[in-house]
Amino acid sequence: MASFPPKFKVLVDKEVCTGCLKCTLQCPFDVHIYDKEGFKASGKDKDERKNFIVRNQENCVACQRCVFTCPVKCIQIEVRPPTYNPHPVWTDAVRRDLKTQSDTGGVLLAAMGNEQPYPSYFDRLVIDACQVTNPSIDPLREPMELRTYLGRKPEKLEFEDNGTSLKTQLAKNLKLETPIMIAHMSYGAISLNAHKSLANAAAEQGTFMGTGEGGLHKDLYHLADSIIVQVASGRFAVHEEYLKTGAAVEIKIGQGAKPGIGGHLPGRKITEPISKTRMIPVGSDALSPAPHHDIYSIEDLSRLIYAIKEATRYKKPVFVKIAAVNNSAPIATGIIRAGADAVVLDGFTAGTGAAPQVIRNNLGIPIEAAIASVDQRLRDEGIRHWGSIIASGSMRSSGDVAKAIALGADAVYIGTASLISLGCTVCKQCFTGKCAWGIATQDPNLTKRLDPEVGARRVSNLIGAWSHELQEILGALGLNSLESLRGNRDRLRGVGLSQTELDVLDVLPAGR
Amino acid sequence: MKEVVIDSKGIHYKVLNFMIEDAINAGATKIVLENVNGQRFLLDGVNADVELEVHGTAGDDLAAFMNGPRVTVYGNVQDGVGNTMNRGLVVIHGDGRDIVGHSMRGGKIFVKGDVGYRVGIHMKQYEDNYPVVVAGGTAMDFLGEYMAGGVVLILNIGDAPFTGDWVGTGIHGGVIYVRGDVPEFLLGIGAKATDLEASDKKLIKELAEEYGRYFGVDPKPIYESRFTKIVPISHRPYAKMYTDD
């Protein structure tokens, strides 16, 4: 028995319900249970069957699967009003956590991003627009450049004596048609159908998807030109062919949702296909240690960067991902100086399939501050062109993307937004492996609910729409190329920010 | 057989590795590197039917991500030999250093002498892939740390008392054998010493014989000695750590 009252009410309009039982088949959390024996024993008519569906309301997570799949739309989920005696410090959420923890003695697990009500800097930044003196551009009728190249840029260009061919050897860059990439979410954390959807969407939009730490399923190797493969501390699935297959390789040091700690895919989630892709035995825990065992310094990091560059014969850009933390700026310059072609900054609201709640809610810093400080530091040191900055962590709209780019990012990763596009309702149960929408699960009965063709189209729609919106924003700014917005903090203004915060973000207050 | 000899003296590793790549592409089946002096990443990520002979000291990450070749080093190696290696053989006629066989998934590494800290760390096995690290001398602290599969065998031919602390810390798969005694207080969190079974003795005998062949040592007195076997207490050490399990 749970130690606290149910969070949600499951309301069924019995007048409308036909007793079709679909909800009992759709709910993976055992909320709607059909009492078949009871119905048979009662000897009642089929019309009465609806009265033999029991609702275990305490199991409901408000994933909305039953609501959407009910053919007659007779189900409604409501949040129960707080039931404890109100207290401003000991809130309902706090009391629930304490009781859950006391039941099991375990570390509280949580999914999706930080749930604490920290203020969002994106919501306190506004974007400039042209009026009269500097005309805006109509993106529908004029060329608007979103193309982005990620990687090291040359100091200067030198040409052969004929004046037309390039003498300078250019480092390998990734070519993006839009600055929006799909974040690293592993096969294991999400289903193969989700991976297929995301990879196809990335390919269609001329951008890239990250594999996460779980490797790349053989069915997706044909899309490898649109895929960035990841090397994390567990080195799962990392082998020579995998490194050579991806368009780029990303070394994951840290993750915004859980800075400084490792990962842990429980053995019960290592099914046969996951085992094949990760190259580990079925049922064994996949432990990703907190640090890489061969990296304890920037020099060590450089060694891994070059081990990967050597293994891929200098044909693939190598990125390094860190969680946004207090000293991201000096770390990022170390990363770029160590040879990385891009640094990936993952902010403290970034999503996750599973993280200890206390880590997720309390560690790391906002992505906006990290982008601005890293961009500034690289500029101050005169090495901004050595590597690109990729930002991630709760990019909710093209507005957030534009602000991230104006603060100094070259491109962004979207994770949660792409999952919501696939059908995710942010019910925060990813770590249970029971995702009702077939995304964060490996249960074949659930994964088949996600059609990868439909999924790919939806995510492609989303990225395409955001790209159009970015063009609109550029047009309003009177810019015809995203390159002109990059690090252009003069086109941002702060609203309701302290002078210190404005200094960190290097933006002026609105009105100045 | 086509043999290529390269004098590595004063050549940067990047250039040297391109020379090796060119030789492999030109059909070399054996490459001999003379005067190697710490050049890194030799045969890194190479998937080819080729044999490499290294004369001198091989630098960090020798055979990292390697998938198939055979390497013989006449000298010592620096850190990270066989890092995330998939397949192949490395035979070192000298000492190894730290993180030998880090995250290795398959293939074999034989070191004639001693090895450093955190050897065999996070080695893992998968189906036919079964990584093997054998050292003739002794090993330092954190031997087999975080190990998830494969075998680490320390032959301790010099009969020095084993002093490596924190053996098998965080081990959740695979097995460590150390010739002689490993006092209980040297075992790390999650590791336990158990008795050897016939299958363990057979494996030790096979690997000691292979060691003997590479380095011209009589394996019989080695494999007939007493060994300590160290294994994980649990394959799911953190199963009860979280509220959902």
Image (spheres, coloured by chain):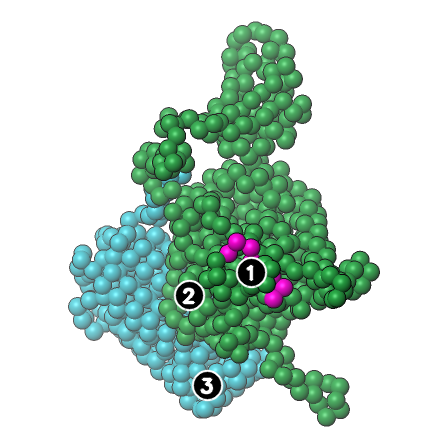
Mark 2 lies on residue: A327
Q: x%, y% of residue B3?
A: 52, 85
Nearer the observer: mark 2 or 1; the answer is 1
Mark 3 lies on residue: B33
Q: Which chain is cyan?
A: B
- C-alpha gap between disc 2 and disc 3: 43 Å
- Amino acid type for the residue under numbered disc 1: Pro
Is any atom of residue A145 visible in this view? no
> Where A28 sits versus B55, above or below?
above
Q: Which residue range is magenta in the image? A: A490-497
Residue at 50% over, 77% down? A381
Q: Chain A drawn in what color?
A: green
Chain of the residue under the numbered disc 1 shown in the image: A
The answer to if A9 sits in the magenta stretch is no
**Callout 2: 10 Å neighbours few (<14), some, many (20+)?**
few
- Amino acid type for the residue under numbered disc 3: Leu
Q: Are marks 3 and 1 in contact (CB under 8 Å)?
A: no
Q: x%, y% of residue A186?
A: 53, 52
Residue at 47% over, 45% down? A117
Task: Locate residue B104: give its quadrant.
Answer: bottom left
